[in-house]
Image (cartoon, rainbow, N blue to C red):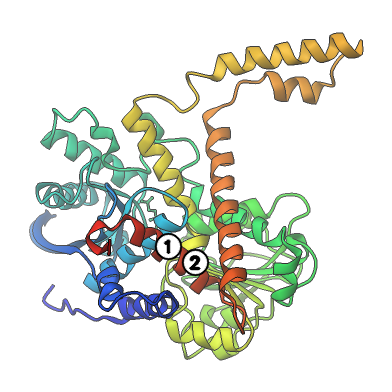
Amino acid sequence: MSDIQITKGFQDSVARMVDHALEMLRLPDGTGEALKACSSVVQVSFPVRIADRLEVFTGWRAVHSAHRLPVKGGLRFSPDMNQDHAEALAALMTYKCALVDVPFGGSKGGLRIDPRQYDTAALERITRRFARELIRRGYISPAENVPAPDMGTSQREMAWILDSYRDLHPEDLNHIACVTGKPLELGGIPGRLEATGRGVKYALDAFFSEPAAVREAGLTGKLCDQRIVIQGLGNVGYHLASLLQAKDSPRIIAIIERDGALLDEQGLDITAIHDYMQRTGGVEGFPGVRFERNGAQVLEAECEVLIPAAMEGVIHDGNAERVQAKLVVEAANGPCTWDADRILQSRGITILPDIFVNAGGVVVSYFEWIRNIAHVRLGRLQRRHESTRGQHVVSAIEMMTNRSAPDWLRESLTRGTDEIDLVRSALDDSMRLAFQEIRETREIESNHAPLDYRTAAYLIALRKVLRARMDLATF
Ligand code: GLU
């Protein structure tokens, strides 16, 4: 691990997007730099015995802004992980949380590792050791810094981290809130696994329910009339694609994966492709549709909506000129570089930015954290009461009309609300409200040329962070 370089590519790209919004805010000198600065970052290296030899692993956790506590953000396991990524992704978390009114600061971390090269037992040892390194330094705790799954990690890793934290802090009453995205049996919340993908779907619904927004993007019709290309059938892409496949759905005409892309103008069968990937590890050889080995080229395919849902920097100055979609929906963190953003905007392509589109994960993490801190399942106290009240309403309607209430009405009024219903409706609400706020800001701030969605989203986020940063206050 001697090749750790501190490149600044990703961070610079995010910083330039922020700068663009800062120019419109006209803040006192130095304030913009203070807002952008990463508050702290820790790098840890530690040995773990793998088979009969010791291997040294290196990981990071960056805290971008702790204006609200805890700070929040995923923990990623990837061979590309480095300090630049941790800092860039931590900054995105700050702005994302602010935009969707999740009262957390921004953090992110990760380990430089290719998890596919290790068996479960080794991964458990590595994860527990990494967790201990971060816990000891105060970079994981329910009150201060709460990780969640990200690329290369899942519920399983969160369970190991939770257990490691409990070992070190058995007295902490709130220990289960030290991570989100946990298995349900360990205090996780229903709906967290699908949350980011579902949030992307709600973002698309919000966009397509605004005829003016659709027209402005040069599109016509509803969401179901669009041809969609999705990059990445991981946790985000898969749940999004599954939701898009419901009745009256848009056509998903291409899926881009690690080993190539599948294309079919008639629309792909996501469930079958996902099953195939689980069995074979890739998409190559999936029967009945076209396979293209050069997946990156399919980002340039003719379609209405392109949804990069895999990783950062996939649309850059080398391919942005050739993207044919009218709407780019950033389901991944940082899929368009700053240069790509400028090229796409100049070509009239609309971008829905990552800090809005993929915020669903952290929104539901927030609900999970509240549930853990409150030590009660959401809706537990009111469930029975609501259903009894619903029964009274049905009886009153029937008495007054002398007719029996239709089954659907009876069912919807008398059924107590489940936690998953609360989670989904609150997620939908968060995405819709954020979209409305972005639309309003665009309207207010567009002087001569219309303001792009990303800059509007950053303006909102920066103003909210600024209001909460006492150290930057000017009164
Ligand atoms: N890793 C997710 C993200 O990038 C979720 C973070 C969280 O829930 O804390 O937004």
Nearest the eye: 428 or 265: 428
Which residue carries the number 1 mark? 461
Q: Amino acid at mark 1?
A: Ala
- Residue 233 in view here: no
Nearest the eye: 52 or 167: 167
- Residue 433 in view here: yes
Nearest the eye: 164 or 73: 73
Where is residue 80 drawn, in percent x and y?
Answer: 29, 72
The number of callouts visible is 2
Q: Quadrant of the C terminus?
A: bottom left
Which residue carries the number 2 mark? 457
Where is residue 52 drawn, in percent x and y?
Answer: 9, 56
Where is residue 468 drawn, in percent x and y?
Answer: 32, 55
x 60%, y 63%: residue: 440
x 51%, y 72%: residue: 454
Q: Which quarter holds ligand 1?
A: bottom left
Q: Secondary structure at mark 2?
A: helix
Q: Mark 2 touching mark 1, by CB under 8 A?
A: yes
Q: Secondary structure at mark 1?
A: helix
